[in-house]
Image (spheres, helix red, strand yellow):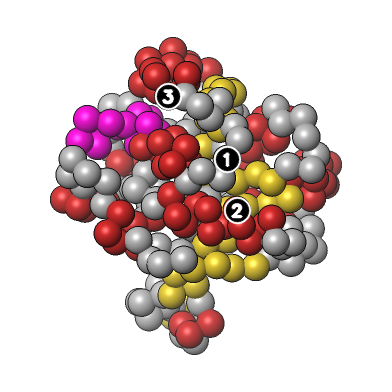
Amino acid sequence: MVAAAGQGTRLGASVPKAFVPLRGRSLVERSVTAMIHSAVVDEIIVLVSPDMEDVARRMLGELLCAEVPVRIVHGGGERADSVWAGLQAVPDDDAVVLIHDAARALTPPGMIARVARAVLAGSPAVIPVMPVADTIKRVDGDTVLDTPDRSALRAVQTPQGFSLAQLREANVAYFADTDPGFTATDDASLMEWAGVEVRTVQGDPMAFKVTTPIDMMLARTITDEAEPTIFEVPS
């Protein structure tokens, strides 16, 4: 599943972030293409807001007729709502599902395959991670409370991979709980909340998220006519 229903207001674009062009191809096009090139997916579901469906169909164009079937499903107002709509569109409980942010448009296909293989090997929840380079402070307002040991911290990327049946169960429990005590900012946090063990695999620097204009400048700088696979971390 490629999540492309958000607005991405921090980018400051006139269209939702997933539809912003990056050297002639939108972020969502690039993300769908990476999924196809990973050679591990049987179907791709693109989650878009209802008012962007026609735009998505025009942008995806020939990708909708690729060897890997591509479907468009309407997402919701929040990420969790969009993912739930996507999960309901998959009939097979035995499936492995990969959930990817369209904004991580330069994610190497090899990293996508790495996540999928880890789930297929028996882990019910798998996330790609990168070491944290910056010193991190925990704060309350403008007051520093403490400094966590960054050797134990990781930055989380997508796609995140899951056993579909267990992710469905976690979603059902989450939406049924009137006071879950937290907001699920990613699907792995939802699985943690449900008591499912989450494992990690090596992420990739190219899987950075395009969120701000500076991120887009970086993406444009490192992208040329050929996909920048030379930056991929080896499997």
Q: Looking at numbered disc 3 in the image, what kind of residue is underneath it?
A: Leu
Image disc number at residue 54? none
In the displayed structure, 198 sits above or below 110; it is: below
Whether the residues at callouts 1 and 2 have beta carbons within 8 Å, the answer is yes
In the displayed structure, 101 sits above or below 81; it is: below
Residue where numbered disc 1 is placed: 41
Q: Nearer the viewer, residue 160 or 94?
A: 94
Find residue 143 and report its image quarter: bottom left
On whether residue 48 falls in the magenta region, the answer is no
On whether residue 17 falls in the magenta region, the answer is yes
Mark before the other along the chain sequence, 1 or 2: 1
In the image, 133: left or right of 199?
Answer: left
Q: Looking at numbered disc 1 in the image, what kind of residue is underneath it?
A: Val
| Residue 222 visible | yes
In the image, 13: left or right of 120?
Answer: left
Q: Secondary structure at mark 2?
A: helix
Mark before the other along the chain sequence, 3 or 1: 1
* Residue 185: percent from left, percent from top: 58, 52
Residue where numbered disc 2 is placed: 116
Mark 1 to mark 2 CA distance (whole Å): 9 Å
Q: Secondary structure at mark 3?
A: helix
* Residue 233: percent from left, percent from top: 38, 66
From which residue to which does the magenta span run? Answer: 16-29
Residue where numbered disc 3 is placed: 63
Mark before the other along the chain sequence, 2 or 3: 3
In the image, 52: left or right of 212?
Answer: right
